[in-house]
Structure formats: structure tokens, C-alpha cells
Image (tube, grey):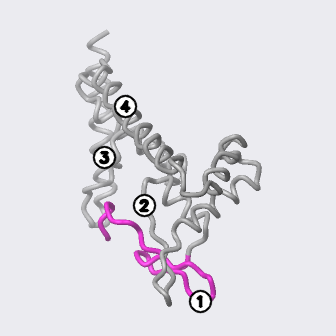
Amino acid sequence: MAEKNQPLLIKRYASRRLYNTETSDYVTLEDIAGFIREGREVQIVDLKSGDDLTRQYLLQIIAEHESRGESVLPVDVLNDLVRSYMTPGGSVVPQFLQASFEMLRDGQSQMMDKMNAMNPMAKMPGFELMQAQQQAFMKAMTGGLGGGAAGWSGQTPQEGAGDSPGAEGEDLDAIKKQLAELQEKLSRLK
């Protein structure tokens, strides 16, 4: 599988269909929006000319969400964006927005790090196991859809599992055993 740090390359064919080069299948704008929600960067290029169409398609995704009544940006912000593009000589608005989003991402990351560090349960024996079980439960409940509890550590309990057919059952047995041990420890703490 391709490295997650590199942008996911999507090629647009002359028929305007979008082709995911990692999975070798066609994708929709909603699929691309899903990749982005999962944290992937995407790059969309025209197959014939090689032109980068990423910005055009990202704006189209935002426009489609807006047309469905899912407000992405307040009207005042949209007006300011239009004004900034109409200003001769350019504007500082795009750079300001980029810096603002970078600060937001950094702030969220720092906040999550502090919450994990301050969480007294994180020091409790078996806490990582409970996180893995919660992630497995959320994945099972959501049918493996994006979001869920994967944001806690970014890993699922199945990562690193063997490829043998019985590996998943063995992992489940190990989780059950660890859960029983954890429950026993918790009952002793009471």
C-alpha cells in the first residue's frame, strides 16, 4: 500500500471520471471528501494535460455540501473571499486562512496530547487494552466507516495481526482473556 504521507493521486480521464491510482477503481467526489475526512491529502490531475485540478475539485466538494444545506462557511466569510479575489494585486486573505487553519490543527493536536497526558485513566493498568476494545467495538458498530474511535490512537486492534485465517479469532480470544483479567483487577480495586 502507498505511504499515507504522500498525497493520494486521483487522475481525471477525458470522460471526467476520477480514478484512484492506489486502489485502481473509479471514485466520486463524495469518496474524495471521505478520504480527506480520514486525514488523507489528495491530488487530482488531468490525465492528458497533467494539470493539477485539486483546488477546482475541493471547491466543488464544498459547493455541493453548501447546496445540500450543509453550511461549510458563513456568508460573511464567503463574501470576504469573493472580495479578496476581486482585489487588484491580490490579498492576504488566502495566507491568513492557511495560517489560521494550521494554528487550529496544531491547537487541536496539543489539546488532545494534554488531555491524554492529564487523563488519570491513562496511567491505569490495562487502559491501552480498553482503548483497543473500544475501537474494535466502534468499528463493529459503524461497519468500519470513517470517524469512530480511531482518532484515539489511529490504530485498530487488528493492525499487526497475522494473515492466517485463524489470526482474527486468536486476537478475539486474547482480547477476551485480557478483558477478564482487567475486570478481575478492577473488582480487586473496589
Number of numbered discs:
4
* Location of residue 161 in the rendering, given as x and y in whole percent from the top left corner: 26, 57
Q: Nearer the viewer, mark 3 or mark 2?
A: 2
Give the CA separation, mark 2 to mark 1: 23 Å
Q: Identify which residue is drawn at 31% across, 66% down.
A: 165
For mark 3, give the secondary structure. Answer: helix
Do tag 1 and tag 3 residues touch (Cβ < 8 Å)? Answer: no
Give the CA separation, mark 3 to mark 4: 31 Å
Q: Nearer the viewer, mark 3 or mark 4?
A: 4
> In the rendered structure, which amino acid carries the disc numbered 1?
Ala
Magenta residues span: 1-26
Sequence-wise, the earlier of marks 2 and 4 is 2
Q: Is residue 17 magenta?
A: yes
Number of residues whose C-alpha sits closer than 10 Å to that of mark 2, classed few (under 14), some (14–19) or many (20 or more): some
Q: Which residue is mark 1?
A: 14
For mark 2, give the secondary structure. Answer: loop
Q: Which residue is mark 2?
A: 41
Asked which quadrant contains residue 126, the reply is: top left
Give the CA separation, mark 2 to mark 4: 21 Å
Number of residues whose C-alpha sits closer than 10 Å to that of mark 3, classed few (under 14), some (14–19) or many (20 or more): few
Give the CA separation, mark 1 to mark 4: 44 Å
Q: Which residue is mark 3?
A: 173
Q: Nearer the viewer, mark 1 or mark 4?
A: 1
Q: Which residue is mark 4?
A: 112
Asked which quadrant contains residue 16, the reply is: bottom right
